Amino acid sequence: MRYLTLVLLNLPVIILALANIVTQYKMNKITKHRFGYQILVWIIILIVIVSSFPVYNYIVGEPIFDSRELSLFDVVQTTAIVYLFYIVNDLRRRIEKNEKIVRDLHQELSIKLSRGGNGKN
Amino acid sequence: MVTKSQKKVCIVIPAYNESAVIGSVVSEIIKALSTTPYLWSVLVVNDKSKDNTAQIAQKNGAIVVNHILNSGAGGATATGLSYADQNGFDVAATMDADGQHDSDDVVKGIGELIKSQSDLMIGSRLIDSKGMSRVKVLGNKGLSFVTLVLFGIRSTDSQSGLRIFSRKALNQLTWKSSGYEFASEMLWRARQKKLIIDEFPIKAIYTDYSKSKGQSNWNAINIIKSLLKQRLVEMFE
């Protein structure tokens, strides 16, 4: 039941992230290379989440990992990491977009405003 | 009349508080360009200096673009190259405002770029590092090594401020960094855009003034930190 909860909680955000990446690619906002890379990252996250049941079953009792079964705390923690990863990645993208706008605006304004001061321009 | 061989060349000099030497730097480069067949302009990007860098540069014959905000070396260089792109220059060259670069090397680099069909030509101080202090050589070699490890770009002098850009490079090259780390990032972006990068040897002129204005080796740590952060962040982009 806990494994199912983990998958159900995380699946929507992973699907949302994948949908976002495909939309950005289709709208030519990211390159093919970036598209491939982002898809790969989120597919790995998806595989890790979905395969958590067999992975936990395997590592329970293994001396190297010395793990217990998935607890409710593990479910919350893993879900939080995936959600935060999604949010941070999205925020970073927005900040970079805004930075670029400010940078371009500053550049354009500086060139345009200086035009009057130079006899040669 | 403008003939086919008359390339339009723009020399971009990003400057911050360089009133002591900017006049001679501008005069020297104008003198060197006057002997060439190019149609040229010398542009000083005044990065909100607190002294009269802009006035002195203009008085000595440069076009001046005044930044509204202080943006760092990367920002000022980007503004200069954007100006060159907007005004249809065929070639642009960036050089330091502290008098570290020989004007003849700039002219030589422009010729090399036109001859070699490269898109980005870097003036390397380390092909022949005579006159450079061991500490500077070590710092620059270290940063070139970091550029190789992080971005896979082999350059003998990844931090050189003397760079020549083709029309294609002017049109396609953009970068995000505003500080000194832009020098390495620019090489990375150029490779992403599949631009041809080449190098040519230059000599560095180290005066007491340029030594006092140059980057401290400690700044290399900041540069490495920024480059590493950028490389990691873009893994998820």
Image (spheres, rainbow, N blue to C red):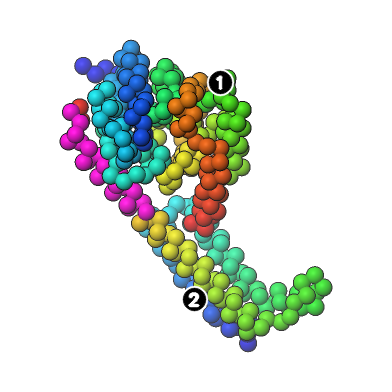
- The answer to whether residue B11 shows anywhere in this view is no
**Prevalent SS, magenta region:** helix
Amino acid residing under circle 1: Gly
x and y, in percent, of residue B206 in the image: 49, 23
Q: Position of residue B225 (x, y in %)?
A: 55, 49
- The reply to whether discs 2 and 1 touch (Cβ–Cβ < 8 Å) is no
Task: Pick the residue in front: B16 or A68.
Answer: B16
Q: Indicate which disc residue A12 carries.
A: 2
Residue at 25%, 27% in the rendered image = B58
Q: Which residue is mark 1?
A: B131
Secondary structure under tag 2 reads helix
Region rendered in magenta: A99-119
The residue that appears at 46% across and 40% down in the rendered structure is B180
Q: Is residue A107 magenta?
A: yes
Point out the residue furthest to the right here. A63
* Crowdedness near tag 1: few (<14), some (14–19) or many (≥20) residues, C-alpha within 10 Å: few
